[in-house]
Amino acid sequence: MKNFKWPLMSNNILPNDKKVLVNFINRSDKFTNGPKVKEFEKKWSKWLGVKYSTFVNSGASANLISINILKELHTNKKEIILPAFTWSSDVVSVINAGFKPVFVDINFENLALNEDLVKKKINKNTLAIFLTHAMGYMGLSKKFLKFLKDKKIHLVEDVCESHGAKLGNKKAGTFGIMSNFSFYYGHHMTTIEGGMISTNSKEIDRLAKMKRGHGLLRDSQDEKFIKKMIKKNKDLNNDFIFSTEGFNLRNTELAAVIGIEQLKRLNNSIKIRNQNHKLYLRLLRKDIFFKNFNLNGSSNYGLHLILKKPNLNLIKKILHILDKNSIEYRLGSLGNQLRQPYLKKFKNSQYLKVLKNTEHMHFFSVYFGNNQFLRKNKIIKLCKDLDSLII
Ligand SMILES: Cc1ncc(COP(=O)(O)O)c(C=O)c1O
């Protein structure tokens, strides 16, 4: 694998994380989901500002469980509105649960669903909006939240890329009926692999914890509910009541120990990421690149180059500059999921025409890493090199 001078992701497992982990290993003999997981969940809930959280083994698992939980709402509504500019696991979760994905375009300003376009797609079959707060931007507005509340449409938030983004003084992940986070290597904080489902609903929390552990009743951590269900299922062994459709998506005590340490540094990491982002946007030339991002409450994940106008030749020249600086990048960033082979069935030319900004991002944008270890001189050098571009 190529060694980049400016990689997409940088190691955030620091010597102290390793020390704490080794100490834990040396004094413990149980490493599967246990008290440390509970402690991490409690501390995460407090940091985020919700009542309950469930630690799982990835952000994709958090997506999968959350959308599966929507099946338990017992409704005939089958449509879920989501962006095509998102991660594959968001779309896969919707399809796997038997819902119909309805794709809506995004804004450039926050790379999230365009609220006016969402409103046009809402009908009597709309069950939920599965919104991605992409690349660290706040994807919601107060007006839109009020609209969803009035219409009684559920909101599920994917915050896998935007830990700490805010609307007013509330964090992304506290607005929907539940929210998803990823702690994959290189995200705002990491547990190596890991994810979280957060919610203020006792019922959703119970379902998330059971679905994480095979659907088992005893994993619900709700004594009252357990007693009630045992009474109802006298023909079953109390320890083997599979109460809901479940998976095994548990994480370990080891990952939780790392998570607890990382959480202590999260606010500071966000601060440095945002400082880098602001410097980058200040230096970035404005004649060819879109710079008008909504930075209110943003918690930057990665740096973007988005062309103002389509120009494939210019993209080639830009990639050449990134290569010369040994910068790892992703052309299209999240891209248009509808162009991916796994969604062949849903792709049609009409959809591609409607998803204008998503298509523009797919072909005329590139993103590369930002993190708390990125040196300012690298940002300054890159922006200088981009200044020399001739259109
Ligand atoms: C928006 C979004 N959702 C979900 C995921 C899946 O997270 P994970 O890689 O932890 O499975 C990612 C991955 O980075 C993501 O960017």
Image (cartoon, grey):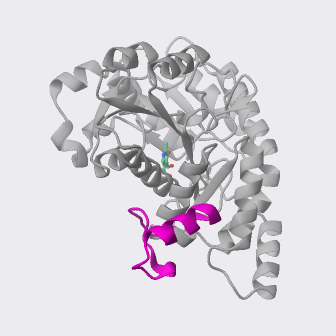
Q: Is residue 189 left or right of residue 117?
A: right
Work out whether 357 lies above or below 184: above
Residue at horizontal 18%, vertical 22%?
350
Percent x, y of residue 5? 62, 51
Percent x, y of residue 2? 50, 59
Q: Nearer the viewer, residue 198 or 353?
A: 198
Residue at horizontal 70%, vertical 43%?
50
The span shown in magenta is: 220-249
> Quick check: is 297 in the magenta stretch?
no
Residue 222 shows in the view: no
Report which quarter residue 268 is drawn in. top right
Percent x, y of residue 326? 55, 47
Residue 130 shows in the view: yes
Q: Is residue 183 left or right of residue 249?
A: right
Work out whether 174 lies above or below 54: above
Q: Quadrant of the C terminus?
A: top left
Work out whether 358 lies above or below 1: above
Percent x, y of residue 12? 70, 58
> Quick check: is 221 in the magenta stretch?
yes
